[in-house]
Image (tube, rainbow, N blue to C red):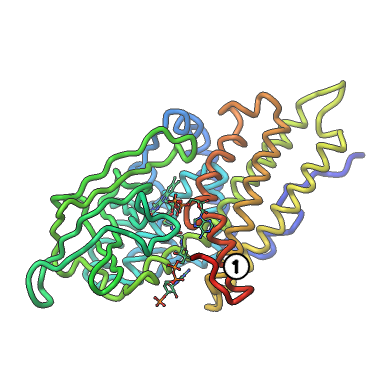
Amino acid sequence: MAPASMSPLELVALDQLLDDEERAIRDTVRQLGTDRLRPYVAAWFESGTVPARDLAKEFGGLGLLGMHLDGYGCAGTSVVAYGMACHELEAVDSGLRSLVSVQGSLAMFAIHQFGSEAHKQRWLPAMAAGEAIGCFGLTESDAGSDPASMRTTARRDGTGDGADWILDGTKMWITNGTVADVAVAWARTEDGVRGFVVPTDTAGFSATEMGHKLSLRASVTAELAFDGMRLPSDAVLPTARGLGGPLTCLNEARLGIVFGALGAARDCIETAIAYAREREVFGKPLTGYQLTQAKLADMTAALGTGMLLAVHLGRLKEAGSLVPAQVSLGKLNNVRAALDIARECRTILGASGITTEYAPLRHANNLESVLTYEGTAEVHQLVVGQALTGQSAFR
Ligand code: TGC
Ligand code: FAD
C-alpha cells in the first residue's frame, strides 16, 4: 500500500508552532481565500483591476486590517497570527496581501506608532473596519532604495506652532494610491524627514493609477502628486523624526512579507503536485518520476525552512528582541526562495503553466514586485552585510 501523502507544511509540523488562536485565524483566512478570492483572482490579474473597496470591507469585517495593533478597533493578535494571515492571503495573490500590508503595517502602523491621539481617533477605527483605505508614500521616481534623497518638501507657511504646512512633490509606485482616503506621506522639512497624515480630498492632492504592469496586477499602484498642498499644523506625525520613522514602519510590513511570500510558494507547490498527479507523460503520472520528486523535495525543504525562520522571527518580535537586520535576512531568504519555487513549479506544468488557469506564473510575476518593494534583495544583502562586517557599503 502506498504511504499517505502529506502537505508541504505538515512535513515541518508547522501547526505545532502555532497556538489555537493562530491556527484558527490561519484557517479563517484560508477559507476566505477558497470561498471569496480564488474564484475571481485570475480574472482580476488579467484585467488589472481589483475591487479594493469591497475587499477592504470584507477584510476589515474579519479583523485582518491592522490586526496586530492594539486598541482603536484593531484585533490585537500575535505577530505570528498576522504573519499567517499574510501567508494565506498571498497564497491567493501577492496583491491581496499587499492591500493588507499597506493598510495595516504601513499606513495604520505609522498613525498608531507616531500619530497624535486625534489622528488615531479619526483614522484607526475606520481603517480597521475597512471603511477607510490608507496608502504610504515614501518612494519617488528618483528615490527608491535611497529614500534619504527624496525631493518632496514640506515647508511652514506662517509663524509659530500653528503655522500651516505646504507640501510639494510626487511619489511613485504607491500601493492603494487611487483608492486611498488617507495617505501617510513622507517629506523633507528643515528639521529632516517628517511624516504627514493627508486626507486625499485635500486641495492640491491627486493620484493617478500606473498601468502597463506585468506584475502585481491585482493591486492598485499609483503616482501621487502634492501641488502646493496646504495642510494644518497638526497634520504632521508628532513623534516621527528623521528617516527612522518610515523605516520603522517598513520593518512591520517586511515581516509580513517574510510569511506572505511563502504562501505564494506553498500554493505553487500544491498546484504542481495536483497537476503532476494527473498529468501522464511517457505512460505514467509525472509524480512517479525521480526528477519531479527531487524538484518537489527541494522546494519543500526551502519552503519548510523558510517558514520555520518566519515563525522564529515572529516570536522574536513578540518578545521585543527582533532587530531590523534579522527582518532583512528573512525577507531576503524567503522572497528569493518563493520566486525560485514559483519558477520551478511552472516547469512542472509545462505549457499549461504559462496560462492564468494555473497560479505559478502569476505568483512568479507577482514575486518580482515583492523582491523589489519593501527594500530590494540587494538592499537587504547590504543590510545583512553591514550587520556581519560592521561596514556600510550603501554609498
Ligand atoms: P541610515 O543612515 O542607515 O539610517 C537612517 C536612520 O534610520 C534608522 N534606520 C532604521 N530604523 C528603523 N528600522 C530600520 N530598518 C532602519 N534602518 C535604518 C537609522 O538608525 C538612522 O536613524 P538616525 O536616528 O540615526 O537618523 O539610512 P540610509 O540613508 O543609509 O539608508 C538605509 C537603507 C538603504 C537600508 C534604507 O534606506 C532602506 O531600507 N531602503 C529601502 C527603501 C524601501 O524599502 N522602501 C520601501 C517603500 S514602501 C514599499 O515598498 C511598500 S510596497 C507595498 C507592499 O508592501 O505591498
Ligand atoms: P532603485 O532604487 O533605482 O534600484 C535599482 C537597482 O539598483 C535595484 O536592483 C537595486 O537593488 C539596486 N541598488 C540600489 N542601491 C544599490 C546599492 N547601494 N548597491 C547596489 N545595488 C543597488 N513604495 C512606497 O513608498 N509605497 C508603496 O506603497 C509602494 N508600493 C509598491 C508597489 C509595487 C508593485 C512596486 C513594484 C513598488 C512599490 N513601491 C512602493 C516602491 C518600492 O519600494 C521601490 O520600487 C523599491 O524601494 C526600489 O526602488 P526603485 O524601484 O527606485 O529601484
What residue is drawn where x is 17% and y is 51%? 227
Residue 193 relative to residue 144: left or right:
left
Work out whether 253 lies above or below 294.
below
**Label 1: how many Cα within 10 Å (few below 14, some 14–19, many 20+):** many
Residue under circle 1?
384
- Vertical position of residue 147 compared to residue 369: above or below: below
Farthest right residue? 1
Nearer to us in this view, 352 or 191: 191
Q: Quadrant of residue 76?
A: bottom left
Q: Position of residue 321 (x, y in %)?
A: 55, 78
- The residue under the point 35% across, 47% down is 176
Q: Is residue 54 above or below residue 194?
A: above
**Could you tell me which secondary element the residue under label 1 belongs to?**
helix
How far across and how far down the image is residue 65, in percent?
40, 56
Residue beneath the point at 10% across and 77% down: 160
Q: Residue furthest left?
A: 158
For disc 1, does the CB lie below 8 Å from ligand 1?
A: no
- In this view, the residue in front, 109 or 274, is 109
- Quadrant of the frame with the N terminus: top right
Task: Name which residue type carries label 1.
Answer: Val
On the picture, is 101 further left or further right than 183? right
Expressed as whole percent of the image width and height from the top left, the position of residue 71 reads 36, 70
Tell me the residue at 86%/25% (across/down): 284
